[in-house]
Amino acid sequence: MSATASHRRLLAGLTALVALLFVASLLTGPAHVGAVDSLAALFRGQDDMLALVMREIRLPRAILGLLVGAALGMTGAVLQGFLRNPLADPGLIGTSASAGLGAVLAIHTGLASAFALGLPLAALAGAAASVALVLLLAGPRGDALALILAGVAISALAGALTSLVLNLSPNPFAANEIVFWMMGSLADRSMLHVWIAAPIMAAGFLLLWPTRRALDALTLGEDTAASSGIALKGLRLRLVGGVAALVGAATAVAGAVGFVGLVVPHLLRPAVGASPSRLVPASALGGAAVVMAADIAVRLLAPGRDLKLGVLTALVGTPFFLHLILRTRRQTL
Amino acid sequence: MVIRWLMAACLVGGLGLPAGADEAPRRVLSMNLCTDQLAMLLAAPGQLVSVSHVARDPRASALADQAMAYPVNHGDAEEIYLARPDLVLADSFAKPGTVQLLRRLGRRVELFDAAQSFDELRRNLIRMGDLLGRQDQARAMVARFDADLAALGRPPANRPRAAMYAANGYSEGPESLAGEIIDAAGFANLAETLGVGGGGTVPLEVLMLAAPDLVITGEPYPGASRSEEILRHPGLTALTARNPSRVMADRDWVCATPQVLRAVAALAAAREAM
Amino acid sequence: MSGLTLQGLGLTRNGRAVLSGVDLRIAPGEFVGLLGPNGAGKTTLLRAALGLLPADGRSSLADLPEAARARVAAFVAQGRHIAWPMPVDSLVALGRIAHPGAARAADRAAIDRAIVALGLQGLRHRQATELSGGEQARVLIARALAQDTPILFADEPIAGLDPAAQIEVMRLFRDLAGQGRTVLASLHDLGLAARFCSRLVLLHEGRLVADGCPSEVLTPANIAQVFGITAHLSQGPDGLVYQALDLIARPRPSRG
């Protein structure tokens, strides 16, 4: 079938783009080292400093860009499919902010240093609470207003509590970190962060991947989906768990990178014939590409300034968001 | 209500103000860490009525023990006004609103720029002496500082390279007090070769590839922070595993007082041990 | 064998009985029209019978596990909101979700049959969200047909369709019943219901008040009691002919 063939081509193209950006990310950095040298250093022995730079700084940054982007793109596609609403995005519905609150609490209560997975698990808990709350408040009826209002409320509360925790911290640096938690950054991450994020993201991926058929079925509403044999209760639990794991782990290591989950599914939807199930892998790859590209851009545009990732994604994402709101309005009028 | 009360108090305070310029102030209050320390070093007994609460923090303050003898303030206009000081000392980065309010209420406020060099350190000491009417003590202290500095010996011809690395990858350049300390201890400041003037962010990979002979980091503050995570980054750990590193107490670096010589001495000792 | 049996089906919402004591047995080959004014409980009855709502009593469908039920009964829901701008054939293909193990050829054949049955050949590559309301309704019915089940439930399937399309759908349902399927559709058009359904069920305030062939159910007394209107009823050459006439003067018919 030609739809399947073109879908395969799309995925292959996106995979190639992701691979290209991964290499580009490895080659981007403030220390000017030749491409061949630095790539070769990646595979050399421990001893030389360039090899360490490649393995301990550039490689984790590239891997995290890929993982965080894929997680955000995938959750955006899944949330939009489930809520039947193109405005659903982990940032807009407050999931990222709540995950950030969980992460900040873990860091400042010492949970994060007590055991390695404390950080992402606390972020996961924050994210899960917010997703559950959004499902409760907005529900899968596709009501955009309820969804956005719920998201605004949850984001505001989580943001305020995050500020509170950071302000009360005895650490003089903590108060300034609200920017990181709101805007996200991949600067100076290490393989440690990869190891704590990856397993939880893998769990989230495994939870969300099988929901694709259900997302298709939900195109025509809950009743139609349920009458097609979809167990909605189990689906809801899976969705809360999977989204929380992916967004929680991503936010724990990279802060809240906004708009990726909104823009990427929006851009790719026409390319997959609007099929919610096909949108899931496409958005995961697309999200990885967007975050890696943004992370390369922040390093090139403002070297040494630690320009936040979310600044760039918001600059690109906000016009899309406004466009979507306009279109949603036009449809409901 | 409060406003009217404050206005009335202002009038009274205003009338009672003229403590002549040549007459030494009798109630001096300091509201920031660096003026706290200069004032504690130079004030006559009973002259200094309050220092900031930070002055008692042993991590930030070189004179934390001494500060225990003074009542502390938190930099609020109201509490400072009620302490009825005839001279308020503050760093130039003090909250401008507070400073303006105190001045409007008729309090004399003197601001001190944070010294970025030993020259500025000397000037601040002399000025503090003038303000407190303790000119002789100030001059003596500058003379002792210069003598102690000279006693630390001359830097070697071939200077090893040192880099200061703090939270968020911040590194102090040559145009800073820390830069002056590094220089005085006989090191070449890596930040200078990287083009950092006063101070700025140095990416970890740049630091690693530059591989300075000594990495100087600050003591971690209580309560974790994401900003300090970089100091535990495996890349930095790998660097400090092969080149020596020193953890320096912030209190000897933060404010320009003669205490900076402790930092210079510690660094010079580290150099000689290399 | 795959008929529908409801026994004492009831549902209480906020202390009010929305549905009570509904007993209904529908055999294969029947096209049953579910009639009643707004709020009578038609949608609730359909959803409870499918097991989409927790209800008291028994339903032969609600007893089945979800996956098995989806291969026995398909449902054309009332709302026609299509969330994504998908092409028509992709939407119709959603009916095959109920058959996860089916061969691709079987899927293809079922989808093609459904598209032909609803006359959607010319629209199959168009975006469903750009179609007219009537065309969308046909697409949604086609999806349920592609599910290829012995039982078909439809909640107001002909609301908003033009007269020709309404008749097409009613004929299709009658033909499906003729092939041995069980069709239960809630309807507001009493005239079309009288003409095409093999049996009518009248629902009033959550209770079944009449059940039988059209001429037994659509009596002036029933119509007055349940709908509060008068109607012209006559036996034409092709069966019962119904035409609504006017509201019955106040007071409205007694309850129960």
Image (cartoon, rainbow, N blue to C red):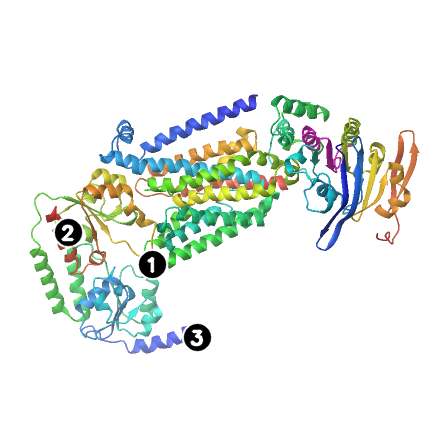
Question: Where, quadrant-wise, is the N terminus of chain B in this rendering?
Answer: bottom left
Q: Is residue A240 left or right of residue A303?
A: right
- The structure residue drawn at horizontal position 15% and vertical position 51%, both measured from the top left corner, is B267
Give the image location of residue A24, x and y in percent: 35, 31
Question: Which subunit holds the residue at mark 2?
Answer: B
**Image x and y of residue A320, in percent:** 50, 38
Q: Which mark is residue B267?
A: 2
Q: Is residue B145 above or below residue C144?
A: below
The type of residue carrying mark 2 is Leu
Dot 1 alpha-carbon crowd within 10 angstroms: few under 14, some 14 to 19, many 20 or more: some
Determine the image quadrant of residue B263: bottom left
Residue assigned mark 1: A170
**Are labels 2 and 1 assigned to the same chain?**
no
Up/down of B256 relative to C176, above or below? below
For label 3, the SS is loop
Work out how far the residue at label 2 is from the one at label 3, CA to CA, in angstroms.
56 Å
Mark 1 residue element: loop
Q: Chain of mark 3?
A: B
Chain part drawn in magenta: C136-162
Tell me the chain of label 1. Answer: A
Horizontal side, residue A24 vs residue A268: left or right: left
Q: Residue at x 7, y 59 (%)?
A: B147
The residue pinned by badge 3 equals B1
Q: Amino acid at mark 1?
A: Pro
Dots 2, 1 in contact, CB < 8 A: no
